[in-house]
Amino acid sequence: MWVLIFLGAAFLVAMTPGANNLLGMHHGMRYGPARGTTALLGRLTGFALLITAVAAGLGGLLAASEVALTVVKWLGVGYLVYLGVRILTARSTPEDTQDDLVAPDLFSLARKEFLVAVTNPKAVLIFTAFVPQFVEPDRGSVTAQVLVLGALYLVAELVAGTIYVGVGAVVRAVRMSRRAHRRLDQGTGVVLLGMAALLATSPR
């Protein structure tokens, strides 16, 4: 039963709008569902590294360190600004499906997902504050439980990310005009810059 409760809570957390989910939706809209979904491997890899760090005891130290969280925070701000500016200054998406032919390689898309994931201080707090709440010391090894719960969270994150990519793919399938696509791209860039501003002005 506790596994179902955790999965439900994890899914709600994973579905929360954020930089990674917005990026996944953008990838689905611009490059299609196959590329957008495959790029989620970058996000999952980043989260897996954070989960491993928590299980190894490094996550608690990071969460307790003002300097470490500040560094992560400003790395995240910088990368969100970079992505926002890149999207705002990118050339318009071609009509029809020709953008599949000029899309970046999958490694490039996955790398963006990975960097957004590991430079997001909120992700650090998810794995140092949210996941450990479901650990029960009397059930056995705490490290093993963190790893299992972390793996379950990755499943929830994969489902949530796929949903966001799917939403983007649906928008793509509508075959909007080039101008409409450009406005959506601009909206994505503006929201990313807004997230960067919120992150920069947020307290620890």
Image: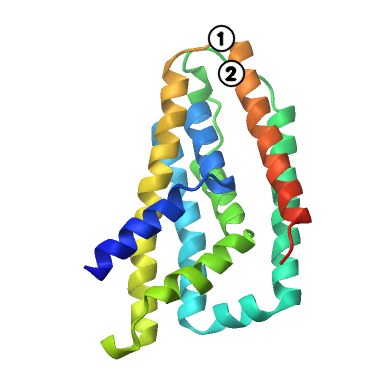
Please, is residue 21 above or below residue 141 in the view?
above
Residue at (67%, 36%) from the top-left corner?
191
- The answer to whether 29 appears left or right of 160 in the picture is right
Q: Residue 72, image x and y in percent?
A: 69, 65
Note whether residue 33 is visible. Answer: yes
- As rendered, which of 77 and 131 lies closer to the eye? 131
Q: Residues within 10 Å of mark 2 (few under 14, many from 20)?
A: many
Q: Are marks 2 and 1 in contact (CB under 8 Å)?
A: yes
Q: Residue 129, image x and y in percent?
A: 51, 72
User: Label 1 sits on what residue type?
Assistant: Ser
- The answer to whether 86 appears left or right of 37 in the picture is right
| Mark 2: secondary structure | helix
Q: Residues within 10 Å of mark 1 (few under 14, many from 20)?
A: few
Q: Residue 154, image x and y in percent?
A: 39, 59
Furthest-top residue in view?
177
Please, is residue 24 above or below residue 200 in the view?
above
Q: Residue 7, image x and y in percent?
A: 32, 60
User: Label 2 sits on what residue type?
Assistant: His
- As rendered, which of 37 and 51 lies closer to the eye? 51
Q: Which mark is residue 177?
A: 1
Residue at (44%, 47%) from the top-left corner?
15
Furthest-left residue in view?
1
Please, is residue 135 above or below residue 70 in the view?
below
Residue at (47%, 60%) from the top-left corner?
45
| Mark 1: secondary structure | loop
Mark 2 and mark 1: Cα distance apart in space: 6 Å
Return the residue at label 2. Answer: 181
